[in-house]
Image (spheres, rainbow, N blue to C red):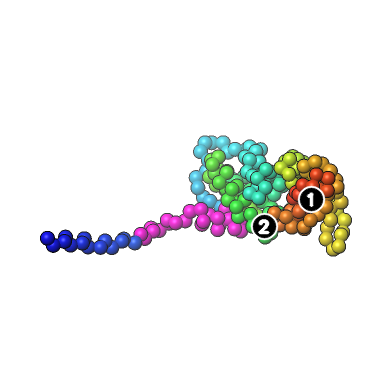
Amino acid sequence: MAPEPLPAPVTPTRYSPQKGEGQGISTRLASFADGLGTDERPARSGDALPSVAEIWSWLAEVPDPEIPVISLVDLGIIRDVAWDGDVLEVTVTPTYSGCPATTVINFDIDRHLRERGIGKLRLKRQLSPAWTTAWISAEGRDKLSAYGIAPPNEATVACAGALQPRDVACPRCGSAKTERISQFGSTPCKAHFRCTECLEPFDYFKSI
């Protein structure tokens, strides 16, 4: 008995995206690389726009992507919130101009506010005055310490050409007997220290 012939091969159909497709998160992230995020979506439904104080409270819920225990408001990089007509403008100062988390921060701000009904939003990047660790709130410093990161100490002395903090207390046992192991920690904004009392290593948030 002769074998049955094999079925003819099926030629796959190539998918061709339509105009406007494929412009999702990656495109949005690219647009935030320069700190810009203007979108002309419909404004928030309802007659009254949310107050600036309410928006500040929403932004206080957005965590820093590198140190999620503190918010962007705790970190002090949200400099201003204002309404320009029906467009909400949020001014952001990055911790430093080359911070790799800047794009993610802008995206998180955009997503968080749109989830609360903000339709027209403009993110403005402000580089002057430059961000400083003095802008970190007292609550933010307490959160850093509880998380195991020594908060910045703005009192510094010159040491071998670098800025050496006077006293960095161990966030684990509270001892001031600590030593710097490396000027660079888990991220560029932190240095690596060790406590000579409890012998635990920890990160120190560099003072800028």
Percent across and percent down for residue 179 are 83, 52
Pick the residue in front: 162 or 35.
162
Q: Does the magenta stretch include residue 30?
A: yes
Residue at (72, 55) in percent of width and height: 185
Q: Can residue 105 be seen in this view?
A: yes
Q: How many marks?
A: 2
Assess disc 2: are there few (<14), some (14-19) or many (≥20) residues with their C-alpha within 10 Å of its C-alpha: few
The image quadrant that residue 15 belongs to is bottom left
Q: Which numbered dot is residue 194?
A: 1
Pick the residue in front: 177 or 156.
177
The image quadrant where one finds the C terminus is bottom right
Extent of the magenta region:
15-37
Left or right of residue 18: residue 48: right
Q: Which numbered dot is residue 76?
A: none
Left or right of residue 121: residue 79: right
Q: Which numbered dot is residue 99?
A: 2
* Secondary element at tag 1: strand
Pick the residue in front: 127 or 161.
161
Disc 2 residue type?
A: Cys
Q: Is residue 106 above or below residue 162?
A: above
Disc 1 residue type?
A: Arg
Percent across and percent down for residue 90 are 63, 48
Q: Is residue 80 visible?
A: no
* Secondary element at tag 2: loop
- Which of discs 2 and 1 lies nearer the camera? The answer is 1
Percent across and percent down for residue 112 are 57, 44
Q: Does the magenta stretch include residue 8?
A: no
Left or right of residue 130: residue 117: left
Residue at (74, 46) in percent of width and height: 149
Left or right of residue 73: residue 42: left
